[in-house]
Amino acid sequence: MIKVKNLSKKFKNFVAVDNISFEVPAGEIFAFLGPNGAGKSTTIKMLTTLLKPSDGEMTINNIDPVKDPKETRRSFGIVFQDPSLDEDLTAWENINFHGVLYGVPKKVRKERGEQLLKLVELWDRRKSLVKKFSGGMKRRLEIARGLLHHPKVLFLDEPTLGLDPQTRNLMWSYLKELNKSEKTTIFFSTHYMDEAERIADRIAIIDQGKIITIGSAEELKKQTSTESLEEAFLKLTGKKIRDEEANNVDRMRKFNRR
């Protein structure tokens, strides 16, 4: 479903993604695990036509995102790291507007929209303005919206960032059900070890723009002779994601004090 070969992205003298290659078969749940700045979001932006690669090749559903971006967009849905809903519209209006943009027939928009809003437990709030929703409710609505046009692939860039553990678990239960019932391929980025280990069929560990290795959580632990994914990540990269997060928090605090 997704094929990437020798993909790179440079911003002047900075190499954000450095010659990576991987494949994701249809129906798989695939995770990009790495610290902030590892190249996860940049890779997703290239796959979803938001950035052009500096070098390399890629296809989604056998379509080249560079040569045919419009047709590629019909093959995927995406939930961005940052909120992308129109908060001055209702939940249903956000769903319906998305369907219009993707050319989804009115009857299908109605039936599919109802199905998805019920799945993410927002049907009773379909007439409520999104500005009144909690962060978790907005994320669930974004997932429903991203699936409206029956995409082959759903991309999720740090989808549970800032959500409480209960909401995170609830969100993943919806996505695993969709993956099972509709065979939707799911590609998500995360820096949560437990999330990658519990949810993904396979995990690509990425750091400083390079893919270090790819495998299931068990395969990565076996490869490194470790007992946890966190230990495996440390052995493979020489760093802890939690240390990276702490450094980022410290930098943000210093910035806010200026």
Image (cartoon, rainbow, N blue to C red):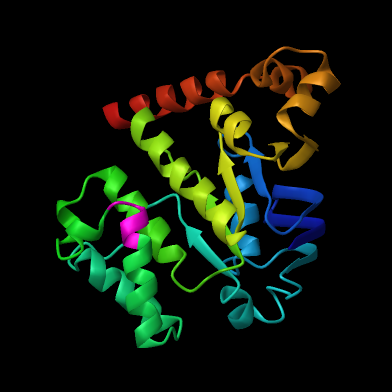
Residue found 19% across the figure and 66% down from its top = 90
Q: Residue 70 vs residue 61: left or right?
A: left
Image quadrant in which you'd find residue 189: top right
* Quadrant of image for the C terminus: top left
Q: Position of residue 157 (x, y in %)?
A: 52, 49
Residue found 76% across the figure and 17% down from its top = 235
For this orientation, the residue located farthest to the front is 181
Q: Nearer the viewer, residue 61 or 162?
A: 61
Rendered view: 177 above or below 4: above
Image quadrant in which you'd find residue 182: bottom right
Q: Position of residue 214 (x, y in %)?
A: 79, 38
84 drawn magenta: no
Q: Nearer the viewer, residue 27 or 94?
A: 27
Q: Position of residue 73 (x, y in %)?
A: 57, 74
* Quadrant of image for the N terminus: bottom right
Q: Residue 112 vs residue 6: left or right?
A: left
Residue found 55% across the figure and 24% down from its top = 244
Q: Position of residue 53 (x, y in %)?
A: 71, 64
Q: Taking the image as drawn, is residue 258 in sight?
A: no
Q: Nearer the viewer, residue 215 or 80?
A: 215
Image quadrant in which you'd find residue 166: top left
Rendered view: 148 above or below 119: below
Magenta segment's dominant SS is helix
Q: Residue 71 vs residue 255: left or right?
A: right
Q: Residue 237 vs residue 247: left or right?
A: right
Q: Taking the image as drawn, is residue 50 in sight?
A: yes
Residue found 64% across the figure and 62% down from its top = 46
Q: Nearer the viewer, residue 212 or 229?
A: 229
Query: Which residue range is magenta in the image?
Result: 117-121
Q: How many marks?
A: 0
